[in-house]
Image (cartoon, grey):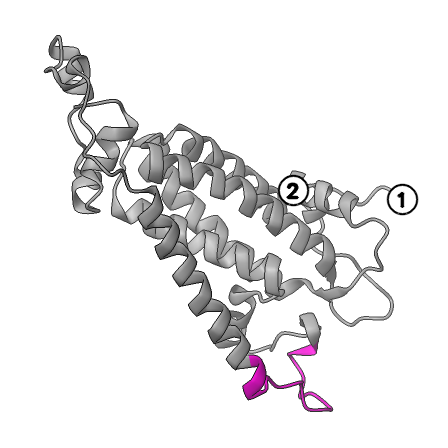
Amino acid sequence: MTPPLFQFGQIHPDYAVPVVNERAVRASAGILFFLAMIAFMNAFLLGNFQPTRVFVVVFLMDFGIRLFTNPLYAPSMVVGQWVVRHQRPEYVGAPQKRFAWGIGFALALLMLYLMVLNNVVGPINMLVCGVCLTLMFFEAAFGICVGCKLYNAFNKDKAQLCPGGVCVVPTERAPSVSLAQMAVVLVFAGLSVTVAQTTHRQDRPSTPLTMPAAAAAAPANASDAARCEVPEFAKVMGHADKWKLHNNCP
């Protein structure tokens, strides 16, 4: 049956509030997180902000459809629902999800104003991107909706049907982490750091590298000089040398 165009959440006879399929929501968050990481790394490592601008517009449209029409028509939700189509639905309350998605929509509006409309790049963009990535990662990886937790602080009617039943007092104690398990994690982390340091020393050249004469020469014209001018955000972040390296500047 085709869902209505304007309806937030599905009406289910077994639940007192509108619901959404948490499995599709988490799949959607994973899809958006993957795309956001591609855009973020292009900006952070290569100084290329075009993928970020595209993602901001896509993210804003996706969340706009969720909030103002029906989440079932949001592209990322459609793909996510198709991916988990063979899994049993896990229904959670829609009101707290709407609040959480409203936070994401507000962040996307801020990024649209800064990056897309005014071409502003800098630490504030990285901060907002970092917040968005964190929220999507927690949703996709752990099923933790941070915005949903804030819902109770701003609404008299408390959230219902939370993922994992965290809205209600658990009837039995959740499994705890033992000291032996924590020891394994610490040893694993220590070994990982040791391997990283060892491979880093092996990768360091025995003799200092020299730049080719052509690369060491000054920019041939004024346009090259302007292109190689390190932007302020890279200086603030301490990535001036890395920015020059990725943009083939001396």
Q: CA distance from mark 2 to mark 1?
A: 20 Å
Image point (72%, 41%), residue name: 79
Please say whether residue 244 is visible from this viewpoint.
yes
Which disc is residue 55 wearing? none
Relative depth, front residue between 38 and 143: 38
Identify the amino acid type marked 1.
Met
Question: Is residue 58 covered in magenta?
Answer: no
Q: Which mark is residue 76?
A: 2
From this view, report whether residue 227 is shown above or below residue 47: above
Quadrant housing residue 12: bottom right
| Foreground pick, 157 / 180 | 180
Disc 2 to disc 1: CB gap under 8 Å: no
| In magenta stretch: residue 178 | yes
Q: Amino acid at mark 2?
A: Ser
Residue appearing at x 44%, y 31% in the figure: 51
Tell me: residue 155, above or below residue 58: below
Whether 94 is drawn above or below 235: the answer is below
Task: Name the dominant secondary structure of the magenta segment.
Answer: loop
Nearer to us: label 2 or label 1: 2
Quadrant in the picture for the N terminus? top right
Do we see residue 154 in this rendering?
A: no
Magenta residues, as a range? 165-181
Q: Which residue is identified by label 1?
A: 1
